[in-house]
Image (tube, coloured by chain):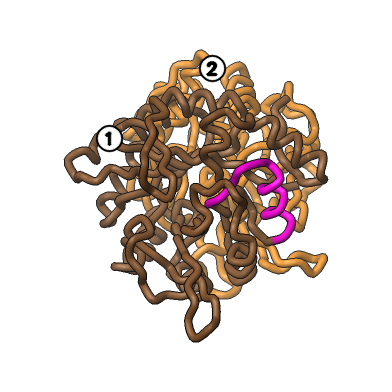
Amino acid sequence: MLTHRIIPCLDVNAGRVVKGVHFVDLKDAGDPVEIARQYDKAGADELVFLDITASHENRDIMLEVVRSVAEQCFMPFTVGGGIRTIDDVTRLVQAGAEKVSINTAAVVNPDIVQQTSRRFGRCATVVNIDPKRVVRDGKTVFEVYTHGGRRATGLNAVDWAKRVVQLGAGEIVLTSMDADGTQNGYDLEMTAAVAEAVDVPVVASGGCGCPEHIRQVLTQTKADAALAASIFHYDQYTIEQAKQYLQEHGIPVRLAA
Amino acid sequence: MIGIIDYAMGNLRSVQKAFEHVGAQAVILSSATQVSDVDKLVLPGVGAFADGMSHLRSGGWVEAIRGYIGGGKPFLGICLGLELLFDGSQEDAGDGELVEGLGVLPGPVVRFSNDAPDGSRLKVPHMGWNTIEWQRDDPLLRGLSQGDAVYFVHSYYAQPTVTDQAPVISATADYGIQFCASVWRENVWATQFHPEKSQRVGLNILRNFVSI
């Protein structure tokens, strides 16, 4: 039986882990390798590293981080943030990233999704989609944003999800820009719409404040996995507590022996 | 000494480091002639089947691998490294055809269907931690409990041809259907999942391979 993955997300700036609320007000939460090792021990199913480094010069630091994590943590992890070209993808894979996650570049240049999928396989190709609820003609639509939620694209999240799967994405990480940082729960309606529309795994992201939110998104939508940051980083709940809660509510999870 | 085949199909450091973590010495082999230097051989890999075969061919690995296995020393395939051992794969093949594999083990490699037999829709790739049930007393899986979870990320799986004389499947997993999670025949072992990414359980498997 396939279990649902619980995935802590680490925002990394110039080699240090930070967590933004609505992507601003960053707080330093430590050394990525050390945190990864702790999550490895704590039984996280996977890790996502999001490089939010603004300057291009500091990007090599991220490759160092990826290399160290790959050598010290025997668990799956995905690296995203700032990927612009197939060369960026190649460098990350060579450093040891098992999956790479493409966001803005997929919108700007959809070819990169196809190239990544061809060269490294669908299994290594993840696309991040960051929608926001907007009202158009009196109707709520889920519009895709890029550049960390600052730029509207005019794309509808469901259509865009289908498109990136056609291009070769093997997984979608769906982050609600409205819910992100609020700890008020995932955007269930949006997650349901996207997870229903595609036949690849969807990771729900944005808004997790407690294990009950994870239960909701895994039972009320077809999301396969749940990503969370603050609730784990600041020790509000351990991974084990979250998984215990889910298991008690009949959701298959992997519990550490 | 364990040799890890480098045939340009992904990063091999995590496999090497995982072996080192369990106390083994592991080297990355860049040339097929080096297989004679190692006591155990590992074929890892992610990516497309056809690319994998073409890199194995151009590097002279096909004969080296067959010869090594024929010589009776322990061999371990991981993920694509399992799939390549079989007769061929549906991946990138025409209708009703297979892209030819190493042919060490009998049977095809086929794609998961999005439609499960019970009528539900399945997400493909099959990605995440799935429980496995071992079917035989395989030395590679010793110390595991029935239902331990390991990490999978793949769209294709092997369908070993069932013959009376030699069983191939050593463990199965359930994803809409029962599929082949690992194989063992004589000195050939392979896992569809990634032991090097499967934390405690995976390291246990690698430790077992080291002590075979």
Residue B7: x and y in percent read 37, 42
Q: Is residue A212 magenta?
A: yes
Residue B197: x and y in percent read 54, 34
Q: Residue at x 58, y 58 (%)?
A: A202
**Chain B's shade in the image?**
orange
**Element class at badge 1:** loop
**Chain A's shade in the image?**
brown
Residue A8: x and y in percent read 53, 39
Q: Which chain is disc 1 placed on?
A: A
Task: Using the image, tell me which numbered label, if any, was put on residue A4.
Answer: none
Q: The residue under label 2 is which amino acid type?
A: Val
Of the pair B167 and B92, the residue shown nearer to us: B92
Q: In the rendered image, which quarter contains the C terminus of chain B?
A: top right
**Element class at badge 2:** loop
**Is residue A159 toward the left or the right of residue A90 in the image?**
right
Query: Decide: marks 1, 2 in contact (CB < 8 A)?
Result: no
Q: In the rendered image, which quarter contains the N terminus of chain B?
A: top left
Q: Residue at x 26, y 57 (%)?
A: A85
Residue at the outermost bottom position: A137
**How many numbered callouts?**
2
State whether residue A227 is above or below residue A112: above
Of the pair B133 and A161, the residue shown nearer to us: A161
**Is residue B187 toward the left or the right of residue A98 in the image?**
right
Give the CA separation, mark 1 to mark 2: 32 Å
Q: Which residue is mark 2?
A: B22
Region in magenta: A206-220
Q: Which residue is mark 1?
A: A14
